[in-house]
Image (cartoon, helix red, strand yellow):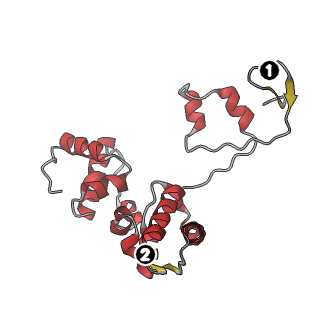
Amino acid sequence: MQEGEFERLGSNETRRADVRIIAATNRDLRRAIEEKTFREDLFYRLDVVSIEVPPLRGRRNDIPLFVRHFLEKYARENGKTVGGLSPEAMKAIQEYSWPGNVRELENAIERAVVLTKTPDLGVELLPPAVRQAPPADMAGSMTFVVGTSLAEMERVAIMRTLDEVGGNRERAANLLGIGVATLYRRLKDFGAEEKEA
């Protein structure tokens, strides 16, 4: 990479390449270097221009643009005429936290296009997690006193999220970004496993 040279597998002939390498990751590579799970020399060869893209929930103004693009793409691929999303469907999409970012949004739109029998896509065509989720900024309403332990903050976050979603553990786990099995273990640790699901 440094010299712009390479050898094909099984060959001794050195070739030159005039390329630009673009790499993407959702990992903190500086932390990975500290943890010895990513090579420092490779990082400095790749780290010429870094662009940090916030998660989709942090750039909600982009959502309608992505929705339009994915609607056109999957309508074309499936030979369907699609007019757009109903106001309820767009509201659900705007309020969802999108833990899977753009890929999850794309999958949701593809699903809706594949399932629709009419030009307008209603909220019922969205994945259950999207159409049933409370607003993404719900968790932002929690405040803690300085000195509160991490374990207590975790317990409060889990219990409040469960309350907000009416005890639905799958939805709570999705909002918290953890697996359902992890949620059950945490509830057991808190002595709250008997709470209504």
Q: Please, is residue 61 above or below residue 176 in the view?
A: below
Quarter of the picture holding the C terminus: bottom left
Query: Residue 81: x percent and y percent?
Result: 54, 78
Query: Residue 30: x percent and y percent?
Result: 60, 35
Q: Residue at x 38, y 68 (%)?
A: 135
Q: Answer with mark 1 or mark 2, whichever residue precedes in sequence.
A: 1
Quadrant assignment, res 134: bottom left
- Horizontal side of 32 relative to 4 (left or right) equals left
- Identify the mark at residue 165; answer none if there is no mark: none
Q: Residue at x 49, y 66 (%)?
A: 109
Q: Please, is residue 55 above or below residue 113 in the view?
A: above
The amino acid marked with disc number 2 is Ala
Quarter of the picture holding the N terminus: top right
Q: Which residue is the extreme one toward the left?
A: 194
Who is closer to the viewer here, 191 or 93?
93
Q: Which residue is the extreme one toward the front?
A: 79
Q: Is residue 144 visible?
A: no
Q: Residue at x 58, y 72 (%)?
A: 68
* Tag 1 and tag 2, C-beta contact below 8 Å: no
- Horizontal side of 31 relative to 46 (left or right) equals left
The residue that disc 2 covers is: 89
Callout 2: SS = helix
Q: Please, is residue 196 above or below residue 183 in the view?
A: below
Who is closer to the viewer here, 82 or 160?
82
The residue that disc 1 covers is: 11
The amino acid marked with disc number 1 is Ser
Query: Residue 124: x percent and y percent?
Result: 36, 73
Q: Please, is residue 90 above or below residue 139 in the view?
A: below
| Label 1 vs label 2, nearer the camera | 1
